[in-house]
Every structure is written in C-alpha cells, then in structure tokens.
Amino acid sequence: MLIPLSWLKDYIELHEDVDALRELLTFSGLEVEAVETHGSDFEQIVVAEITAISPHPNADKLTLCTIEDGSGVPQTVVCGAPNVRVGMKTIFAPVGVTLPNGLTLKKAKIRGVESLGMLCAEDELGLSKAHDGIMDLAADLSPGTPAVDVLGGPEIVFDLEVTPNRPDCLSVIGVARELAAITGRELKLPETPLREGRESTADRAKVRIDDPEACPRYTARVLTGAHVGPSPDWMQKRLRLCGIRPINNLVDITNYVMLETGQPLHAFDQSLLHGDTVIVRRAAEGEVMQTLDDKPRKLSAEHLVIADAGRAVAVAGVMGGADSEIRDNTTTVLLESAAFQSSRVRATAKSLGMHTDSSYRFARGCDMNNVEWVSRRAASLMQQHAGATPLKGVVDVWPGERSPVQVSCRWKKITDLIGVDIPVDTMRGYFHRLGLKDVESSDEGCTLEIPSFRDDLRREVDLIEEIARLNGLDKIPARDPIGRIVPTANDRPTRRLMNLWSRVAAMGFNEIMNYSLTAPESLNALDPNAAARQEHLPNPISQDQAVLRTSLIPQMAETLARNYARQNHELSLFEIGTIFLKAETGVEEQTRIAFGQLGPVHRPALDKQRPVSDTEAFYGLKGVVETFLKSEGVHEVTFIPLEDKSFAPGQAADILLGKTHLGRIGLLARELREDWKIHEPVALAEIILDVLPKRKTPVMKPVPTMPATARDTALILDRAVTHAEILACIQKAAPYELEDVQLFDVFEGKKLGENRKSMAYRFTYRNPKKTLTDKAVEKFHGKIEARLMQDLGAEIVGRG
Amino acid sequence: MEPGRNSFFALNLETCGYHQDTASDPIILSSPNPHIILSSHHSVLQTNIILLCVSLISFYKPCPMQLEDIQHLTDTAVADIAAAADETALEAARVRYLGRKGKLPDIMAALKTAAPEQRPQYGQAANQFKTRVGEALDARKSALAATATPANALDVTRPGDLPPLGSIHPIRQIIGRVTEIFDRIGFTVATGPDIDSVFNNFDALNTPADHPSRDPQDTFYLEDGSLLRCHTSPVQVRHMLKHPPPVRIIAPGRAYRRDTPDATHSANFHQVEGLYVDKKVSMADLKSDLTYFAGEVLGPGAKARFRPHFFPFTEPSVEVDFTCHVCKGKGCRVCKNSGWIEIAGAGMVDPNVFQAVNYDPDAVTGYAFGMGLERIAMILLEIDDIRRLYDNDVRFLRQFA
C-alpha cells in the first residue's frame, strides 16, 4: 500500500521527519515495509522546447532534436524516444548532470553524432517506472523553467503493510485518520463543493438491487457536459506515485478518489448504457461480457454484475465492461459508488482470476456510510477538472441501513490484560481520538458507539488492543520471568527423543532432515512394500513432492548418493522423522530412525584405502543398530532374513522384538546403487521408535565375584546353518553355569569343502557361588559339543 | 689440523702461565699451571682432540699439582660433566677424570709428594674430587637417561584415529535450545501430529471461513478432508481440549505450506509454539518471558520489542523483534540497520479460541507465541539459503557438530 507523504499532508499536519513517521506508523500497527524516494531537486535540469527534428544519419530509431533550453543557444540532442515532435515541451538534462536514476551524463557521440544532453523519460527522472517516451509537458511552459518548478521536489512514498483487520487504512485519508488518532491532531477532510444542474439525477437514472445481501448500498450520480482530456499534472503525479497509470481526467478522478478514500468508484459513459436503470443482479449462468482489459469473461450465477436493460456492464466491485467505458468523446457520465459484500467480491475475483485495486478493497471491506460522500467528492473533482455538471441529487439505494454498533468494556479488564496501569481518563481520551463515541461511561467501564469505518471493533478485546496500541506497546514492562510449574503435558516421549539425538550423534553419525513430501517413484523404488499405503496429495506443488513418505530409507539412500556424487565418500548419517501410512481410516503417523552408512568412515586413519566389503558394511551397521537398541533398553532382538527389492538378495533382515516388527536393515540393491554410480556397499537400516518398549529403570544385579572359566570350540558345519541356530542348539544343552557364548571367528574356504564353514565360539562358564572345577566344566562343555554334533552335524575341529 | 688448533697447542705447550685462548676458540681453557683443563663442548671429535692434547701434554713431565689446582680442577670437572652432551661424552669425561690415565692419578701423585703437614688438606681435596666428580657423573647419567628417545617412541604428531564427527541437525539444535530455555521457566513440551483436522488447524483458531490460508492454494489437504497442519498452533487446541487451565506448554514441530521452494521458503518447515493460560495472564507476562528468552538465546542484554500486528487467533496481536545479536542493536547488515530482528508472532489468546476449547474467556486469559525455527537457525548460524537445511551435505552438517 503506497502512501505519498505530500498527499498525506493534505489531511493532517506532520512536522516529523521521515524516520520519526516511519516509527510512528510501524508502532501503531501500519508497518512501513519500505520508504521510497521519487524524483529529486532536479538541479540544472530544465524545461526545453523541441524546435526542429531531423533523422539521425546513422541510426533509424534515433532522431536529432534541436532544442531551446532558455539560454537562447540552440543545442542538439540525440533522442531515441518515439514521441518526439516539433513544439513539444519536455525535460532537458544537460551534460554533467547526475540524474535521479544514478546516470551521469557525459559529453558523448551517439552513433557518430555528438549529444549535448538528454531529453528525459519519467523513469530517468525517478518519477515512475515509465519509459514509453520522453515527458510531454503542458504547452504553455516556457523553456528554461527549472524542472523542480514543474515536477516538484523529491517525493517520499511509504510502502505500508496493512493487516487484514484494517481495511480503513487502505487509503490516504484512512492513514491520515490513523495518524490523527495516534498524535491527537486534527484530520482535515477535503471540501466537496458542487454546483449541481437543474435536472434531477433521479429523472435520468434509476437503480434496482436484486441482491441486497451482495450489494447493501448503491449510489449513482449523472454528470453531463464532461470534456475528456488529461487530468491535472499533480493528480497524474500522485497516481503514478501510487503505481497507477494516468488515462484521462474522468478515469483518473475515480482512481484518485479511490486512493484517497479507499472507496472504489466506477464511471460509465451513460450514452452507452441501454435504458436508464442500473440493475445489480447475479449473472446468468454462462453470460459473457468483455471487461475493460478487453478479455471476454464467462460468468456464472455466483457472480454479481452491474447490468443495463440488455447486458452486464461491469463485474460488481471488480472491473467495468469494455463497451460502456469512458471514451475520448464521452460527455455524460454515470458515476457509481456502491458497497458490495466483501466475501462475494473475494470469491468473484478469485474465480475469475481478476485481482484489481477495486476488488482488493471491497474484499477487505468498505465503509458503507461513506459511499455517498465519496461520490460527491468525485463529482466535485469532475466538475473542477473535466468541466462536467452534476445533476441534482443522487440516487441512493440503501435497503439495509444498519444502526451503529455499540461495544462495552471494563477498565480493569483492559489494564489487567495489557499489564500496565493506565488512568481511566487517558483511556477515554484514546477512544475519543479513534472516533468512538461514549454512549455510557462510568468508573467501571463504558459503552461506545463504533464509527462505521471501524467495523473490526466488535468486542471488548478489540477495544483493549486499541488502548494497548495507542498507549504504546513499549510501555509494557519486561520483568524477570516468573516460572510456574504446570505439569500437564506429557513430554517423556519428546525427552526420550532429545536424548536419543545426542546419543546417536555421539556414535559419529550426522543427523539429516529430509522433507516429509517426496516423489512417488523414489518411494516405490526404495520402499516397495509400502506402495499400497502411500497418501498422495490432491494438490501437490510438484511431482517431486507429491506423496507423504512411507519410510525414511528412500530419502536416506538419496542423501547418501547426493553426498557421494559430491565427493563426500565417508558417510554415517541418521534421520529421526515422521512417516505416514495410509490406513483404513485416515493416515497413521510413525516416528522412525534411519541409519545410512557408506565408505570406510569408522576405520582408523591408516586403513582407509582398502575397499569396504559387504560383510564389513552389513555387520558394521548391524552393530550400530544393536548398540543403539541396547542403549534404548532393548536387548533381545532377532534378525531374520528379508527379501526386499530395494536390498541386495540375501543381504537384508527384518528386525524383530518377540513378534513386534522393529524395522529392517540391509545393503542397498546393486542395480540401485550402480544407477547412482556408487561402486561400494551402501548400508541402510530403519527402526520404528514408536514400538520400542517403555524404558524400565534398571535394578542392580550382583556383580560376580567367583572366577569364570573359558572354553573355545571350533566347528565345521554346513554353510546354511546360522549363528542363531547354533545358539539355539547350545541353549538346549546349556547348564545354568553357561554365562556367555561369543562368536570369535568365521572361516570359509576351499579346504573345508563345498558349502562348509568353520565357526569358532568362546564359552564362558561361571557359578556365582563357587569356583568351578575343570572336571565340571569339561562335563558341561562335552554335553554341548555332543549336542552340536548330533543336532547340527557339526564337526569339532579344535578346542582349547 | 686447522691453524686455530696448532696455535692452541703451541700456546699450551710453551707456557704454564694462565691464559685464555685468543684464537676465538671457546673449547679449551688453559690453567695457570701446566695442566690443561678442559671445558669441553659438545662433539666427540672435540673430545678426541682434547684427549690427544692431554696425552701430548704428558710428555712434558709437568710439575706436581698445587692444592688450589685440585680444588679448581674439581669445579671445572663438575661443570664439564654437567655439560656432557650424551652418554659417549659422559664416558669420555669419566675416563678423563677418574680413569687410570686420567686426572685422579695426578692428584694421588700430588698427595704423595705433598709436604707432610699439608697432606691432610691434600687428602681432603682428593676425596672431595672423587666424591663430587662421582656425584656429577651419576647426576648427569640419570639426566641423560631421562631425556633419551626410546626405541619404541611414537610420533606424537601423527594424526589420531578419529572417530567420525557426529552432529545434530541445526534445526534440532535450535529446538533443543528453545525448549531447554522455556523448560527452565516451567513449560512442558507438548506435541501433536503433522496431519490434523480443519477444526484444530483453522476453526478453533478463529480463522474466518474464507481466510486465504484455508485455500488449497496455500494449505495441503488430504483426500479425507484432513490437512497437513500449516502451523504448530493446533497443538494448543489439542492440549486445551484435553487439559483444563492452567496450561503452560511449548510445542516444537513440523508444519507445511504450499509455498514454492526458494531461498526462504520450503514446503515443510519447523515452528515452535508457546502457550500460557491462567488467571490474569497479561501482555506484560508475554513480554517478560520473551525478553528472558531473547537474553538466553542471543546473549545478555538482548531485549524484545512489540509491534502491533494482526493474527486471527490472538487479540491484541503483536510481532516480536529481538535486539540484533550481531550489532547488539547498533544497526548492521544482518538487521538492515534497524538494530532489531523479527523473531516471533504473538499475542493474547483470542476469546473465540477459548470458547472453541470450552474455556471460559471471562475466567482465564493467556498468551501464545510462534516462531519459525528455520528463520532463527538462518539468522543465528548465518545460513544463506533455507534449502541447505534439507540438502544434508555432510560438509555443511559437520560445521555444526
């Protein structure tokens, strides 16, 4: 929202400098997002007349203009503007001048012809962004007049962020009124003198509102004898400062008054309207009209239109129609000033994709009480600047006129909520400055009548905000905080997670974070089992983020690959995040942890060159997972072989705790990693954190005092026999004294024979109450070995 | 032999008078008697030269030692031994003073030839020589042993076997810091799901029915009509629906908006939400607590300031700026010369929100605030692009270990 400072000063006295005003506006709630400076003092820049034009000898698009700049000496300037003509008054900047856009003019030859300066367009003078041609000034200006006399001095423009609750500030007067309330100064509204004609408006125009909910008020004025031409320079300049292109006096006045008051207006050429009745109605389904921007618009019954006897002539509150717009020969104007329901305009603008200055203001809400005054203001300007005569009176249809809103508040409630003691009289003063009128006021509180432009004030708390604002938020003290323990939230799960992050990081893993949304192809490739449980977004931004992730593994693999491609070859990553599984009803969320490892990251410095084998990669990450689970109090997990397309065959496992599925681990399928040009194993694992059992506080078990006895046994058996099967077999023959069994060597080789392997275990025996004799240990161990031979066909090849 | 040495020998062999070698050779001093006293420096070569020199001297049948010569010799020997550079030099020194062809026999000879009445003094001097030289040899020996480089010495400058450097993601670190600070003033952490209902995300938070944020252009809806929460505020609603007042919670979490990703926008991001509801909670409480937070997170002296704003779920609503941590409020590039950085949105819980969760808006008041954690991470850690936080390049992540 652009507000030129000089315009603001028409309605309120402001002696503060720009920085002070910026603070004042920002801390009252109209945040100044930027302060722009347009134009300058234009030193040495003057008005000049083009006295002759000749073509440039070396360039088709350039001309040589002879100009008179008041010095009496004709000068030649090379100009590229399309709009040069003899007799034109424009702006001349001689060599040596630095233009407001930063360009310094130097004596230079342009395509072989020397130019003694430059004829300027608006953008070069910092007046606007326009560069369609050099400035075309009023013909009566004399050459040599300083540019600052014509263009005015530098202009400050505030760019304000107006919050949605304050549509009343979407205008220059609105901002001035707000500043008046903050500073306690007077707001000066413009005079609206009218010399009305004898004929009555009501005889020339009628208004019929078919949908009073969508159009609570509609006023029409008719002006005759208008002369269409350019609007005054000052008006054009203000429009430009606010980013609006001047068109002609009548259209400019409607725009100018909209910027000034916040009330959008529309001017019809009445001679182009059929019949004398303006009808406010819903569009017929499929009705088509051509809007001002020359685009055909297909309308529906959801859209409110302004229509004449035959057709729609405007999309109400959004844009006028092309075939009833003001033209160069327009003489009779029908001026519309109306109130349209904000939600209707918002929906219409959205469905038609037409977001205009008008729809923006209506969508936020306009001051219904002001509709007629604004019409009068515009008519007054049309009389002054377009020679138009307004007919007598105004047609004002206002079926649902509403009585003013009243709101009550309690003084104590105000000061309690703000936390500052404010004297009651001071608070009353603030209300009055805001234009709120006392209906009733006591020591306890007051009831106030709310002005129509402050429709946002409906409740006590809205009034509290006004007091807080006007009194100054900087008056609210900051004390030392007062703690209060309210142990309502159960934050144990979060605390467990927090702990976990540090623990995994301490194991040398880097935490990553991926988006919750990902590409379905990526999920399908790397989480094949979850295809049925993917939740696709109906309105994704892109295919890359079209589905909620069902696992952390796909993005983990992608992250490893992305890093690898960037020559980060030693990677230990983890992610803790939410995944989403479509269920019968709704979508189930789970918190999981994923691990990913690639390269010799955990090897000593001098052992990095050797390639990482599948065994090292798999058991390395498996160890991490096991340690991680142990640190979470989970000891008795089992790993069972898993066939999963995303993992290499025979190199993956499901992780179970009893019958509970905890997750999976494996080496990424070779084809998948080769696609990423990764020629070494990629280890991946994922654990579902939600299913981990609650942690129990450990209770001390006695630390053994008796010595242990160890026995080593090496077995040769079938390659297919697993470690788990061996342990299970040992378990069957294990005495109470068997404390621990550790695998310490695995060997496979030709000399063992086809499909055979050797596995060596260390058995630890201990009786916590007494020292075991060799004989006893021998007996225990013999039994176990016998069992291994008998059940698994194991051959005992070494013992110690 | 180099000329310096020749002249040295000449000098020493010609005269028994006291002199210092003038040929600028610092190695050898001669004494006022015919004995050559060695104040050796460091190399074995030098020592050998000196020994040669000593053996040459013995041809010249020196006159017997005087008492003061013995005392002087003792001092010199002790100094000489103390300066022995290594074990070889030390052994040479031992031979030189205590060896069969060393100084000790001369001393013993002097003792024999001494006048009987002087003998006890000579005896004492000779004992002293033996004791002090012996001690000096022992002391130097253990000193040399202490500084020796053993054969199995390690090159301590070689790189260690580094365990890989783990790290916690910057966003998680910020979450940790924020929750820890509020934890200290009595907030508990509350959480909610990423997928939530329209009621919790919008309706209960007083969002008007046609508010733009409800638009499918801005918010991700799922097929069943639920949505990916567009802020962490639904946790407030969930919590208040479950617990009667008072409540004092902090709720970090992930939120989603349908923004096209760029340097400052991401389809999912993290927020932390704070809520305190009780009898008589005021804006002063809000400012006090956020000022405390500012000081904890940005350093002592950091302040919070309020600017009026508008949010549907709070009234009054404010935007909260903290003192710029880089310039301490003086104005710099980071804060665009304002001295302040925008950190949070906040306000007093709107009575309509209380009604939606069945709280009595006349009995309780409360404050709520929300902060974007990516934004805070980017400001504090000077991260230039939000996408880096989701790109997960280890060279980036390890910087924040």
Image: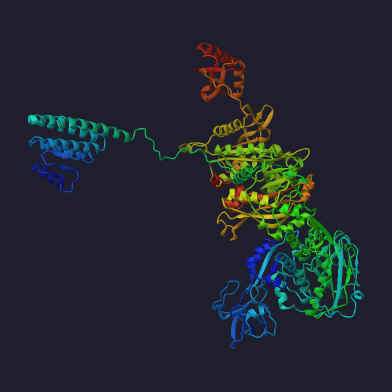
From the viewer's perspective, is A267 left or right of A551? right
Q: Could one spot residue A687 in this view of the protein?
A: yes
The extreme front residue here reads A443
Q: Quadrant of the N terminus of chain A?
A: bottom right
Percent coordinates x, y for residue A19 in the rendering: 63, 66
Residue A441 drawn above or below residue A308 = above
In this rendering, would A164 be left or right of A308? left
* Relative height, residue A251 to residue A159 (above, below): below
Measured as percent of width and height from the top left, residue B219 is found at 74, 50
Look at 7% across and 31% down and name the residue there.
Answer: B115
User: Which residue is at the far bottom?
Assistant: A72
Q: How many marks?
A: 0
**Quarter holding residue A703:** top right
* Of residues B5 and B374, the one drawn nearer to the viewer in this rendering: B374
Of the pair A232 and B310, the residue shown nearer to us = B310
Colouring style: rainbow
Q: Position of residue A483 (x, y in %)?
A: 65, 44
Residue A114 against residue B372 in the figure, above or below: below
- Comparing B213 with A459, the one in front is A459
Asked if residue A315 shows in the view, the reply is no
Work out whether B140 lies above or below A699.
below
Pick the residue in front: A604 or B96. Answer: B96
Picture coordinates of residue A671, whole percent (x, y): 61, 39
In the rendered image, which quarter is residue A696 located in? top right
Could you tell whether A610 is left or right of A520 in the image?
Answer: left
